[in-house]
Amino acid sequence: MITWNNLDTLASYQELSKAEKVNLAEAMNGENGAERVKNYTVPMAEGLAYNFAAKQVDDNILEILKKLAEEAQLTEKFEALYNGEVINTGEKRLVLHQLTRGQLGNPVVADGVDKRTFYVEQQDRIAEFAGKVHSGEIANGAGEKFTTVVQIGIGGSDLGPRAMYLALENWAKKHGAFKMEAKFISNVDPDDAAGVLNTIDVAHSLFILVSKSGTTLETLTNESFVKDALKNAGLDPSKHMIAVTSETSPLAKSEDYLAAFFMDDYIGGRYSSTSAVGGAVLSLAFGPEVFAQFLEGAAAEDKLSTEKDVLKNAAMLDALIGVYERNVLGYPSTAVLPYSQALNRFPAHLQQLDMESNGKSVNRFGEPVDYVTGPLIFGEPGTNGQHSFYQLLHQGTDIVPLQFVGFKNNQMDTDVVIQGSTSQQKLCANVAAQIMAFACGKADENRNKNFEGGRPSSIIIGDQVNPKTLGALLAHFENKVMFQGFLWNVNSFDQEGVQLGKVLAKRVLAHETDGALKVFSDLLNI
């Protein structure tokens, strides 16, 4: 029987709080450090590996983390989730994003529908539609092929799909899989839509409107902006637009769209990259075969995340170490640092995934918790970040755990040798050097040049960013966030914090304000 308990009531958490802390600088020096790097690694799907040698853990702490995983019933809770129990208690909903890429357990039937069948049907419909667009069977009013696809959405309808598209754009060009250029419009700031429209030929562009409810203010505003641009160009908007929405939304059967593809209430926006939300734009941009490979990588990592042995389950171990850093060591934030330009928007997606999921101060029963929960997440690709905020990471007053991601090979297979090494070798040399610099530091009598070290990090290593490795990487972080939510006993699948601002914004636009809100409205000339 599953029990849902707060973290601070668990005996293993109390034991973890009292465990002797690891001196990271000592642990990572010399032969001992070399052995840690060799031994402290967990295989992931698609050839990826999670290495935690530079984390402040040792064999004793790992044993306690194993106990914590068992006491918190992490494996059992994940099993309950993928078998279709109501895990999203706030909204009384199932949580089914893993089901978009494979069935881990029993058939899940909701609303009288087998949900795996439903998701596969949408994938098949999208694949058929994308094939017709690529062949020219579905074309613009002049019978000419569409060359650009533009996704209109916000939050999870933008951040995840955009990050995935950018991650695979160069790979697709190199491997002959690039079908259509993709653009994204998200911000209600009119300059966002105008800026995108100025870079495309609207006559050869296909627009995807993504809104589960069909009533999202920002998205519908941008849709109107785009429709005006199409009409001004003498084009029929209904011949240039498709919708990704729920079957019950006003968009579902509207004649304003060439087609509608469906999502449901059991997949939150930030978890929707493997649903129709990501599937439509990625299938149009790269072909449905590439999207299928992406799903395959995610499914393989999901399967590994069901493993009960913590040292064989990278997502669970990553989650446990993160909770140790947050709740025992007291670190307030985490930096995500991919040493791959392909992943330049991946930190922004993980920021939403993590902070919107676990930025909660009440447990799943609505009761306040007496401990900290989700950390602040930020990041930037390396080596860019080294010339930006690494100064604070190395010598600032806060210790910030670091999540590196590195790949042995680039996507384009083009490089140059300068001073005896390639650009890719320089990139990889930098990430290796940073791990050791953060961990061990460098003593100097000049305090301004002294590096204390003791700054923990982990790294996920792979051969190359491709559809399968990207899918596995995405699933790793989705499952890490899920496991941390289980540990903190929060509901990782609602986002009430998004709602209050929306309500107040509607009041402002309706001029139903008083007090400070009215003054701010006047200052902004609303």
Image: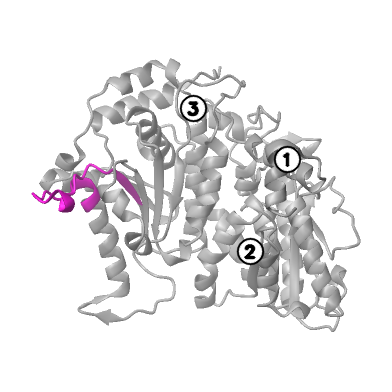
Type of colouring: one colour
Earlier sequence position, callout 2 versus callout 1: 2
Q: Is label 1 or label 3 in front?
A: 1
Residue situated in front as seen by the camera: 376 or 409: 376
In this orientation, which residue lies closer to the viewer: 438 or 32?
Answer: 438
What is the residue that sits farthest to the right in this orientation?
255
Residue 523 pos. (x, y %): 68, 51
Q: Are the residues tagged 2 and 1 within 8 Å (C-beta)?
A: no
- Decide: few, some or many residues near mark 2? Use Cα within 10 Å; few <14, some 14-19, many ≥20: many
**Label located before the other in sequence (3 or 2):** 2
User: Which residue in the rendered view is the most extreme toward the left?
Assistant: 445
Structural distance between the alpha carbons of marks 3 and 2: 34 Å
Nearer the camera: disc 2 or disc 1 = 1
Q: Is residue 269 above or below residue 153?
A: above
Say whether residue 450 is magenta: yes
Q: Give the amino acid type for the residue marked by disc 3 in the picture.
A: Trp
Up the image or down, 211 lies above or below 16; here it is: below
Q: Residues within 10 Å of mark 3 (few under 14, many from 20)?
A: many
Residue wearing tag 2:
282
Q: Check disc 3 and report its element: helix, strand or loop.
A: helix
- Give the residue drawn at x 47%, y 52%: 473
| Label whose residue precedes the other's in the sequence (1 or 3) | 3
Identify the residue under disc 1.
504
Name the residue tied to disc 3: 488
In the image, the segment drawn in magenta is 437-459
Between the residue at mark 1 and the residue at mark 3, the CA separation in whole angstroms equals 30 Å
